Amino acid sequence: MEKIFEISGNIYTFKTEEDVDINFEKISNDNGLSLYKVSFGWKERVFPKRITLEYKILCTDVYTVWDSYRVFATDQTVTFRKTQTKSRLASGMPLKQLFSKRGINRHLLAVSDVRTPMTLSMGSYARPAFDSMTISVDFFTMLTGPFDSYEAIIRIDEREIPFDEAVKDARKWYNGFGYTPAFSPEYAKLPMYSTWYSLWQTMTAEELIRECKEAVKYGMKSVIVDDGWQTDDATVVYGYTGDWQPVKSKFPDFKGTIKQLHDIGMKVILWFSVPYVGYFSKNYQRFKGMYITDDGKSASNCSRLDPRFKEVREFLVETYVYALKEWDLDGFKLDFIDNIESNGIVDERMDVVTIEEATEQLLKDVYSALTAIKPDIMIEFRQAYYGPVISAYGNMIRVGDCPLGSEKNKDNGIDLRLVSSSCAVHSDMIIWAKEDSDESVASQLWGTVFTVPQISVIFDNITDSQKQILKNYLDFWNEHRGTLTSENISATAMANGYSEVSAVHNGEKITLAASNVVFSMGKGEDRGYLINISGQDSLIVKSQNDAYVCEIFDCLGKKIGETSVEKASLCEVGVPYGGMVKVVKAN
């Protein structure tokens, strides 16, 4: 069945699989920014089937597609088939954009409902009008309801403004619905050490203490104790999750180990895989019949708990409260929340019917219980579970796993910065090969400069020069973090990544150059830092109303030269790859 609405010369088509009353109207229009109200009504309470809204726009000056869900995919080009953005409470958000070669917004679509499973799509397959883009919203892509009515606001932004400005405006719009991020304590905004890539599941208490004693020398203030503290068997991945007790062979005195970490100056964040219960855990049989999936054949050797059961939610809350009190933790890394997905089955024992509602109730219960004990508790979430709702229950959001993927770490970090409001955005854990060049190591580190750094190396396995590069990077990051984490961030996007990213704060401008950019300082900016990860050994500095003095540093942070830039001129400055130029207005 179809229902068509014509509004301001545009055709909006709804396609449905069942009898449903549909209303669609424009409720505001302000210089290219329009709001539409969509509502569905059923004669009785139902679990709604998919409803699709589809419309077309003329494809003029459209270069690429943007969304904030680039976890495992990199293609953001305009394709013959529609590229999709999936959204639900615990995964992604309903926001998608087209922008021009110059990075100007052409069409940004956002939906007010960030809880209900839906998919936003954009593509060039607009038969028979191949000069057009087809845009669609698929509502109710997973089990949700029951309800007899539904309503959402659709926001379409066609203002000719920079793409990143349009994205940040959309995120602020979500805040207007009460979707404000959780309080981020100070330590959530400071560099951290992570055991995941460095020590993996084989870590011992001795190794953990050894690496953290080194990490504090570099300015790292917290450690994320990742997978491995609860098992001594690294061959079955998550087969021993679910009991959540430290394995004695590696951690004979877990509470004592955490006290040692506190004594050397490290806060402690502990990893839990929220829904996973391993086949070899004592708790596996306890929750039989309360799993989302449980065929005993998972390659990960575990099943996934279903939070629609009250007993499941209570178990998880009690587990984290016990850990906080018993071991004096400072935070939790709550993993795999995006793997809590609907299986389409409803059980009469469930006190909550939909996965989305149950997931939010679980997170709300966990957050309330933990902050009641320790108000400044740190809670880390990870791509792809982020967004306006879920960020109310976690105060750190990390880039999805991309070991050695420096470009993805950079780009996904900027994506998250644009849509995460005041939440502390962290890089994925940074690791490198001892044999790598100094310039390459520096470039990988600098690529994450606009996110809170997480480092995951074994310090005895890196060279002295790499240690100096790391120290230089973290010293700079800590000294300038007011600018680096400022909400006044802007990016120049290309289909193959962000070529230029800048942040401005208190007269200071910091720019990351991933290509041959032209750096200049604007009114009120009297000092700047231009970081070179372009792969070239020079950058362009442009002066306007003032002359500049430029100090040049190599990838080790050592000053290697100085030059001047005359007023109203363009100057090529020799800046080595992985290095930096400090630009100061001349007296």
Image: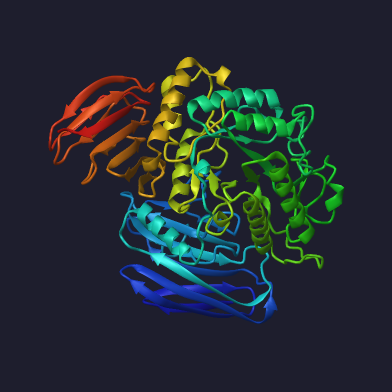
Q: Is residue 55 left or right of residue 518?
A: right
**In terms of image quadrants, where is residue 368?**
bottom right
Front in this rendered view, residue 79 or 220: 220
x and y percentages locating residue 63 in the rendered image: 37, 51
Q: Is residue 516 visible?
A: no
**In terms of image quadrants, where is residue 410?**
top left
x and y percentages locating residue 347 in the rendered image: 80, 65
Residue 326, above or below 394:
above
Q: Quadrant of the C terminus?
A: top left
Residue 293, above or below 37:
above
Front in this rendered view, residue 44 or 419: 419
| Residue name at image x 59 percent, y 59 percent | 88
Q: Is residue 439 left or right of residue 391?
A: left
| Residue name at image x 30 percent, y 59 percent | 160
Q: Is residue 574 left or right of residue 244?
A: left
Q: Residue furthest right?
A: 285
Residue 34, above or below 125:
below
Q: Quadrant of the N terminus?
A: bottom right
x and y percentages locating residue 494 in the rendered image: 37, 44
| Residue name at image x 41 percent, y 34 percent | 477
